[in-house]
Structures are given as structure tokens and as C-alpha cells.
Amino acid sequence: MRRPAREPVRTARQLADIRECVIAGALPRARARPVVFESWRRSLAARVDPERGDGPPIAFDRQQTAEIRAGHPLAATLPLLRETLLADDAVHMMIVTDEGGHILWREGHHTLLRPAEDVGLTEGTRWSEDAIGTNAMGTALAEGASVRIHSAEHLVRRYDAWTCAAAPVHDPDTGRIIGVVDLTGPARGFHPSTMALVGAAAKLAEGFLRDQLRARGALIAPVLGAPVASRAAPPDHLVLRFLGRPPVAGLDGRLIRLSARHADMLTLLALRPAGVSAEQLATEVYGERGNPVTARAEIHRLRTRLGPSVLGSGPYRLSAPLDADFLRVRDELRAGRVRRAVAAYTGELLPGSEAPAVVEERELLAATVRRAVLDAGDVEAMWLLAETRAGADDLELAERLAHALPIADPRHAGMAARAAHLARS
């Protein structure tokens, strides 16, 4: 009975020797598994220190993590994952991350929870390869496949006492990775069948999400009186309708209802195609007192809804084909198509928003449209603008229209009366 218990120790020592040679740039006598060697290479290129002793970065505090968990699609799969992975006598811990490698849930044997906490295996920490080096969760995300990382296969030496197996979970609708399911435990007690068990749990989670999707049915909803997009549209085609009414978005034919804060963020990202940092996001959305940590948590929730192929990071940016009504107005104005621009300008940009970036763009867009319409002298363009909420109180516009419209035009009398009323006010 003793011999099998000693075997993982010898293997760990061999792995440690290989790792030390690779870190030192020397040629080891034996080779690491290709998936491990490639992960070491990526981790070292990301400047991860093998001696790192302070653990993974803490991305979210307890409250932020709870809010993210509440909106994450894998929340609904937790009962199924617990039933599959958490046996009463198993000395291991189940971990579920999001697509960025942030730990959202961890549950398991009581003897492991405290030691795991001591090395940073806790909710809110980030376990991507670029953050903490080779580990099953981060490497599964990097490879897009199930991975086992044993003992000294971890790049950071602090984790040599642990072995973990992880498998990615895909969104059944888009195919994107939305998180990772992982089992972690002491290196000595890891069972050979654990890798297969984790892979099966990930597939069960995907099947559960697929059944949920079928139950909801196809969700193609109208936006501003027209379909958001059709299934023939490019994958991840993002549509934003933010002018003159509550904000709505469409993604690949599905309606996405947005919070006011997420609409603010999407406006900023649409206006800054090169991307923004967390600090810029905090200032331009929340104002001078904006906190980058709060901004990161909020953008993470938005990224969970849209997917990493739509909302990228480093810097934060929109990566999908974009159709935004406020950008369309700007494009039409640049092309000199004033009448088409004012037809697309159905109202102010996010009228209730107080985000500095939105307020600035709202005022600039309104002033630019108004100036272009008045300078063009196009009666139909002026009429379209006068029919908007902003144009209804514009004295100069009303006077110009009353003068330009022929007396025989039925619109003339109404516009003359409006001009007289505004002049008296």
C-alpha cells in the first residue's frame, strides 16, 4: 500500500527538476508534457515570477463577487455540479471560474478550505496564466481544452503541493467559453479518474444550459420598430439604440436589455474604438470620484453578458461589428447627408445619463445636428429636427421654418404659431 503513495512524490521531484532547468534556460534531461511546456513558455513571457509568494491578484471584493455570480450563466448549473463533483468522502475542492479565470465559487472538503485560502484559492482572485502562471484553470482557458496540472507542473513553486484538473464550459448558443469547472486537491491524493469526472461535469453543465436555451426559444426582438438583427447577420453583430428612449441592444439577433450604467459604458466604448483603461472608464463614466475597481467589476458583468469576443480587455474595447444609432448620425453628417442624419437623430443620446462622457457627446451631437440643419437650409431636414423633443423648443428653428415653408403648406400655420409662442415665452 505504501508504494503507490510514494510514486507521486518521485514524479513531483522529476517535474521540479525539469521546471528548474526550463526557468534557468538549460536543457533538462527529461521533458515536460507539451501542454505544460507551452504554458510555462506563455507564463514566463507574461513575466510571471516562479517565486511569487503573494498569491494571485484580487480582482473583486466579496460584494462585487456576489453581484457577478448572481448574473453569471453558470450560477444555474451549481446544483448539478455539486451533485457530480462533491462526494462526502472526497478530499478535494470544486472551483468554478468565469471566462477570465476569476474564481466565483469554491466549495469542498472542510480540511482544504483554510489551506486553500492561505494560497489564494478564494473567490474574487484571478487565476489566468498571465496573472499566476501555469495552473489548471488558467491553462484550460488558454488551451480551450481540459487540462490536469500536477504538483511541480505549476510554474509558481508555492503551488507544488496541489494538483488540479479543469475543463472549460461553453455557451451552447455562441460556442464561447464562459467559465471553467475545476477540482483541486493535495497532490498525493489525486485520483487518475478525476480528469474524466471534471470533463463530464463540464459537458453536463453545457447540456443543462442547452436545455434552458431551448426552453426559452429563439429570442429575436424588435428594436425601434425593426429587428435587432437577423441570423444572417455577422456573428456577434452588436446593435445599440440609445437615441431618445430607454437604451436597448441587440447581439446576433437577441435582445439585450441594459442597465443605465452598462449603456453609459457601451457609449464610451463605441466612441473610443481604440479602447480605454479602467482608470479612463471610471473617470468618464462615474466622474472624478470614479473608482477603477468599481469600473472593472461593472465592465466584467457587462462582458459576461456580451462575451469576450464582443468586449475585449487590455484595454477594454468593442471587438464586434457595431451598429450604433448615434454613430450613424455622426457618419451621415461627415458625409454631408444632413437629411439622413437628422432622420436618424430620433432624440438625445441617453437623455437621463449623467456620465461625463455621455453628457459631453449628447451636447456635442445635438449642437452639431442643429448647426448642420440650419446651415443647410433644407426645409425637410429642419422639419424633422423640429419634430424631436429638443427641436420643439428651438425658437430659431421655428422662425426659420415658418419663413421657409410656403403659406399654402399645411405645416406653415402651426410652425408660425409655435414661433410666436416661443418668442413670447
Image: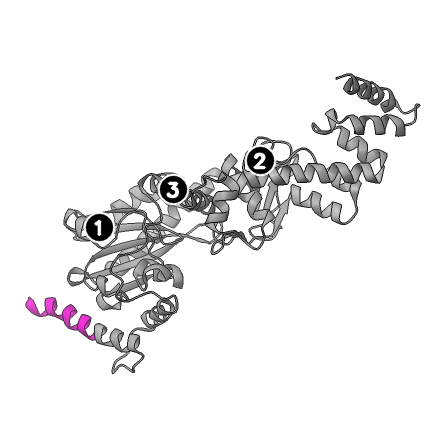
Give the Cα distance between marks 3 and 2: 21 Å
| Residue drawn 71% across the image and 37% down it | 367
Circle 2 residue? 247
Up/down of 314 relative to 30, above or below: above
Up/down of 143 relative to 329, above or below: below
Circle 3 residue? 68
The residue lying furthest to the left in this view is: 1
Does the residue at mark 3 contact the one at mark 1 (Cβ under 8 Å)?
Answer: no
Q: Which mark is residue 308?
A: none
Front residue of 101/260: it is 260
Q: Secondary structure at mark 2?
A: loop
Q: Position of residue 215 (x, y in %)?
A: 45, 39
Residue type for callout 1: Glu
Give the left or right position of residue 412, taking residue 312 as reference.
Answer: right
Q: Is residue 201 visible?
A: yes
Highlighted magenta segment, given as a residue range: 1-14
Q: Position of residue 29 (x, y in %)?
A: 25, 83
Q: Nearer the viewer, mark 2 or mark 1?
A: 1
Q: Quadrant of residue 7?
A: bottom left
Crowd band around label 1 with a 10 angstrom C-alpha radius: few (<14), some (14–19), many (20+): few
Q: In terms of sequence position, does the residue under pointer 3 or pointer 1 come before the other?
A: 3
Q: In terms of sequence position, does the residue under pointer 2 or pointer 1 come before the other?
A: 1
Quadrant (top left/top right/bottom left/bottom right) for the C terminus: top right
Colour mapping used in the image = one colour
Residue type for callout 3: Ile
Give the left or right position of residue 33, taking residue 422 as reference.
Answer: left
Crowd band around label 2 with a 10 angstrom C-alpha radius: few (<14), some (14–19), many (20+): many
Q: Position of residue 195 (x, y in %)?
A: 27, 60
Circle 1 residue? 117
| Residue drawn 67% across the image and 40% down it | 364
